[in-house]
Image (cartoon, coloured by chain):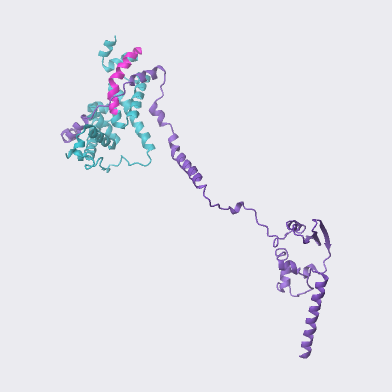
Amino acid sequence: MNKKLADLTDEELIKVFQDSNTIEAYEILVKRFKDPLMNFVYRFVGDKDISTDIVQDTMIKFYLNKDSYKSFAKFSTWIYTIAGNLAKNELKRRKRRTILSLSNDDKEHTIQVEDKSYYAPDRLADGSIKSEIIQRALLKVKPVYREVVILRDVQGLSYEEIAEITKLSIGTVKSRINRGRTQLQKLLKNIYKE
Amino acid sequence: MENNLYNNDSQFEKIVKTLQSLPKIKTESNFEFKLMTRIQNKNFVIESENRRFNKAWILAPSFTAVAAAVLLFFVFSDNPIEFENLLMQEPKMRSEIVTSPEPGVTEAQSAKSSVADNTPQVEEEIAKDERYRVVVNPNDAVVKERITPTFDENKSVDLDNVMNGRNIRSKVSSRALLAGGGSQSNFNFDGFIFRGSDKQMEVLRRQIDSIRSSMQQQNNLK
């Protein structure tokens, strides 16, 4: 039975879970999506503990609101939407808390993430430092652009899936991805000079 | 057109590769166990939303400021310099200039403070039209004597009181009378109240008589 469930697609599994409240189907879906969601939320929020909480909450919401999923949509887009909304709420809450901080919404905001002289090339060769710099740069990109860039370039979703998750048109998604990439490129220009 | 413009991924080839090469973040090993425990316990509180409604952090700066103020208070309260709060001080009695503005209020209370002296203390009490003298004897016996004024109150001045500053407030008109100023056109001068022994009075009278006689002699010579 379990093997059979494991072979099912995401949409078939949620159908089983909706129809017979089979907890195994739910567990398989959790296993499939916990890591991709964690990666997406962490890149968007930048904090592991908060990201873990958000992914847990996403799974709880999925458990509680399984019936609100409609079969014509992809399960992945549905669960990404839940996680994305929770992550955006977290960012809003954090923004309210941060009274004295530089605004990330400033379009003219061109503060360098890292100074070239600070990170020597040999240190940049260290992958962990480089990925840390990229993560910091990502967090400086405007959230509306950051979300789509992560979904596209980190998670590898298609434009159609991103449009479905963000409830935007494909054109807007592409435009936002381009703007986000441009911002990121400016922020990381010292890395690419190497 | 728009699609062509934004489909040009080659422009961002490096950045796309960099993002794709980022390490994948995974959940903790006990993620599913925690999740299933929450579900079994029916603990469906959304942690991230619950955190959002926790407003305790708003008060954090206030708590910090209050704590700092309390600390500073205790740190600086050991300062050896003590400042006297003038508002908390007892008003100093200046019995020699303070008189009762209302008739009937005794001044004898101020005399009690100086009872320790062995000399008899004499104070006057003014009650309406009557004048009393309170005598405190060395054996602490207080005797109240009535004084019959020998001069018209309105036309005379108690020189001792004025000189000692006792009647500053209550007898302003009398002081004007003493100075001979004010609005009174007729300056009627009846004399002074003089406190002293008969011998002193006799000596003064003789001195005054001798002065008068010498003045008369001078006038006669002129």
Residue at 30% over, 28% down? A41
Left or right: A1 in relation to B3:
right
Residue sitting at x 71%, y 66%: B164
Colour in which chain A is drawn: cyan
Q: Picture quarter containing residue A36?
A: top left
Q: Is residue A58 magenta?
A: no
Please tell me which residue lies in front, B144 or B183. Answer: B144
Indicate whether B5 appears above or below B99: above
Query: From the image, which quarter does the C terminus of chain B lie in?
Result: bottom right
Q: In this view, does B221 lie above or below B182?
A: below
- Res. A71 visible in picture: no
Residue A163 x/y as whole percent: 26, 28
Q: Give the range drawn in magenta.
A: A19-40
Label total for image: 0
Whole-percent x, y for residue A32 in the image: 28, 19
Residue at image location 20% in from the left, 36% down from the top: A124
Residue A144: x percent and y percent?
Answer: 29, 34
- The quarter in which the N terminus of chain B is drawn is top left
Which quadrant holds residue B40?
Answer: top left
Res. B145 visible in picture: yes
Quarter-of-image position of residue A86 = top left
The colour applied to the residues of chain B in this rendering is purple
The x, y position of residue A69, in whole percent, is 33, 20
